[in-house]
Amino acid sequence: MCVDSLEDQYRILRKLKTALKKSSGRLIITNSHPCFLQYEFTAFKTNLSPENFNYFNNGIPYEVSIKQPNGNPDVTFTDYQWQLSVWINMAIECGFALQEMIEVTDQPYKDLNENKLYPPFLILKFK
């Protein structure tokens, strides 16, 4: 999640709850799976490795590189590590109810190979 503070995340979720309540809308959070950031996937890789990754280090910055096919340069940005329980509990505290959690399988794309062992993405559906 590219938001670096819990305060900002809470503020964003409260505003979303207010806006979605008016329209009976739903909140869908799609993000890289926080449990497996240390592994490389078809779409992205991070500067974390199995040797330096600690799932419980909330709020630490790390670099994400979105891979491009055919030898094109990667697109890189800074993201922040948050445990899955932080996301879910924060949404619940802001009045959302978790309806569904989907762990998306990795898929090959052009000349990029998939990771068959771990899900790269997570989808959380809230009401």
Image (cartoon, rainbow, N blue to C red):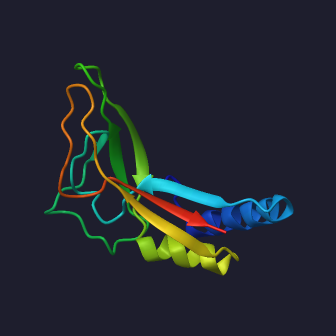
Give 110 or 68, whichever is nearer the viewer: 110
Q: Quadrant of residue 24?
A: bottom right
User: Compared with residue 109, is residue 101 higher up or lower down, i.e. above or below?
Assistant: below
Q: Against 58, is 103 above or below?
A: above
Q: Position of residue 28 (x, y in %)?
A: 59, 58
- 71, 64: nearer the viewer: 71
- Corner quadrant of residue 65: top left
Q: Quadrant of the C terminus?
A: bottom right
Image coords of residue 76 (percent x, y): 37, 36
| Numbered circles on residues, count | 0
Residue 59 seen: yes
Asked whether 92 or 77 is in front, the reply is 92
Left or right relative to 23: residue 45: left
**From the viewer's perspective, is 18 left or right of 110?**
right
In the image, what residue occupies the spot 36% across and 63% down?
34
Residue at the far left in the pictured view:
51
- Residue 27 position, x and y percent, is 64, 60
Q: Position of residue 97 (x, y in %)?
A: 63, 76
Q: Residue at x 50, y 54 (%)?
A: 30
Q: Considering only vertical position in the picture, is 83 above or below 31?
A: below
Q: Dividing the picture into quarters, in which one does residue 75 lie?
A: top left
Closer to us: 77 or 126 = 126
**Residue at the image point whose x is 83% and y is 58% from the top:** 23
